[in-house]
Amino acid sequence: MSYLEAQGRGGLLSWLSSTDHKRIALLYLFLLVPLFWVAVSLGFAMRLKHLFAGDFLMSAQTYNALFTVHGVIMIFMFVIPGLPAVFGNFFLPILIGARDVSFPRLNLLSWYFFAAGAALALLSLFTGRGAPDTGWTFYVPFSLRTGTNVPLAVSAAFVLGLSSILTGLNFITTTHRMRAPGMTWHRMPLFVWALYATGWIQVLVTPIIGITLVLVILERLFGIGVFDPAKGGDPLLYQHLFWIYSHPAVYIMIVPAMGAVTEILPTFARRTIFGYRAIAYSSIAIAALGSIVWAHHMFTSGMSDLAGVIFSLFTFLVAVPSAIKVFNWTATLYKGSIDMQPPMLFALAFVFLFCIGGLTGIIQGALGLNIHLHDTYWIVGHFHYVMFGGTGFAFFAALLYWFPKMFGRMVEPKPVFIAWGLMFAGFNLLYGAFLLLGGMGMPRRYYAHLPQFHPGHLAATVGSWLLVAGLLVLFGSLLRALRSGRRAEDDPWGGKTLEWRIPSPPPAENFAEVPVIDAAPYAYNPGRRS
Amino acid sequence: MEREQGHVVEYAVLLRVWAALLVLTALLLAASRLSPALAVLALLTLTPLKAWLVLYFFMHLRYEGLLLKGMVLTALSTLLVFIGMLFLDIGFR
Ligand SMILES: [Cu+2]
């Protein structure tokens, strides 16, 4: 009997009180998908506004609220939790041969915190004196002075952070304590390594944003003065504290995405992963190095020059472990027997788009160039390549890859290929135009634009139409597969990791008998020792 | 599991740790009166030491395995690195 079928009590209550990691993963998915679409619609509306240079469709104040809420929802409620909360929860225990995570009830509590945080964020839009208009970064002093509903939005981010910490803690403990007999560290699938590294980032840096957001609330309510120079405070301290979390948060988003792609490539290239240890350790290296580059967001803020030089250097260094992964993925594909199924196509798009995102990141990490590029559309283009081109495409790759296992149904590939084409073309048109616009000097977060930027804006808006059309086709075919897809076999892709050895969808406790592991994962090449 | 057995820490040990914490607090106060630079240095060195004493004796980290000790030490040293790196900006602005 699969985990989807009722055990004891049926109905919604059995889901909302379930401690089964697989059900909790789906609970997350059912919150994340609608939130994703809300944020997509907001972005879509912003692009529509730029069909005209001046007043169109909405007021400037509404535009400010739109980019703030688009950012807050996408980052805190989709991209950060995305892969760990859905696929981490579902597959981490299965991949290490466990029946659940270490703390199943804490896991459910994390979901409730997440739901509460999302509810608070949505509440902040419709209560108080208007939706927050600070941008997702909540920079002081503006966030202290604006009359809009900043305190509630900030509290929402705080509660979401709590959820993220508990998930990270659970994953770290699970990886240490719950591995099946014979599942040594170097026999773990690389998605597990990625989740483990991510768990550490979540646990170590999320409390810092939590405290910082509390300070913003205290400053607003009581004027305690930590960020106010008149009282001996320092507004730049806010930016430091914010980015000490929010830069590593980029790695909370991208490292699990890299992990998922690392699972997909060997399956569809029919080859053992190349450079297992290099990929595993580079996840840890990214987590460690990525935690000490935060001030590259502040080169134009008036921070000290010495700090600028050092943070710029560290920023270049993070490219090394990221490139290690890209080279190993490429080497895995080399001489493989490549089967271009939809998950593979999305995974390859991830590698390509992430490379553009990463390389543009190095460009803007140079101190001199950053002065020109800071706060322009270039930056917006860059981080959409990382977060959407990277994490977003990896999320869809993972969803397509594991869909047969999670729901026991196959997705019809043809419409997904069409969806991919629309998304890939639309994406590059939209965010490629952003990179060019930014290079030309178009500032971000501006309601109106000058005539010389108009062609770029038009191209970007048309790109957004293609992208959304692709997303609609993709979600349409996923929904159709849920309702009437062909039944999935246990191992439809020929995968070699543990999830493919159990039924689709898996039974409640995953394994009838706890497996004993005696070889490395991805055992495609015969005769390879573990 | 070791921690399930419970550990009785002698009062003498607890009192000595408490005394050490008081001495460290006094040192911190004295340093902050002397000069701001010294205050920062003392804060960065003595406060983690105090935190470690509390964790180690009062919170029974002493009886845990090497793994858990290492994890707590990682968290503590990460915080130190972050605070230390902030001075790259604040100290040289
Ligand atoms: Cu950054």
Image (cartoon, rainbow, N blue to C red):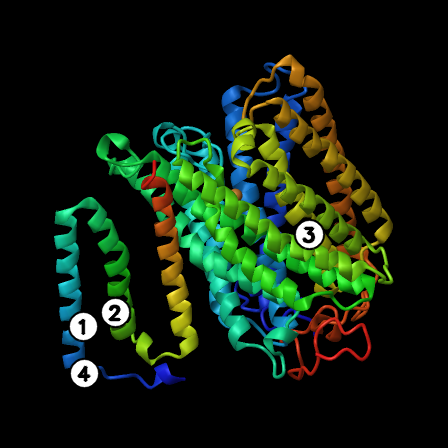
**Label 3 amino acid?**
Ala
Q: Nearer the viewer, mark 1 or mark 4?
A: 1
> Which residue is located at x 49 percent, y 66 percent?
A170
* Discs 2 and 4 share one subunit: yes
- Find the distance from the CA under tag 4 to the CA under tag 3: 55 Å
- Find the distance from the CA under tag 3 to the CA under tag 1: 51 Å
Which residue has dot 4 on it? B10
Locate the N terminus of chain A by quadrant: bottom right
* Discs 2 and 3 share one subunit: no
**In screen coordinates, is B34 left or right of A131?**
left
Which residue has dot 2 on it? B53
Of pointers 1 and 4, the one earlier in the residue sequence: 4
**In screen coordinates, is A160 left or right of A236?**
right
Q: Is residue B87 above or below residue B75?
A: above
Q: Nearer the viewer, mark 3 or mark 1?
A: 1
Q: Quadrant of residue A229?
A: top left
Which residue has dot 1 on it? B17
Q: Quadrant of residue A37?
A: top right
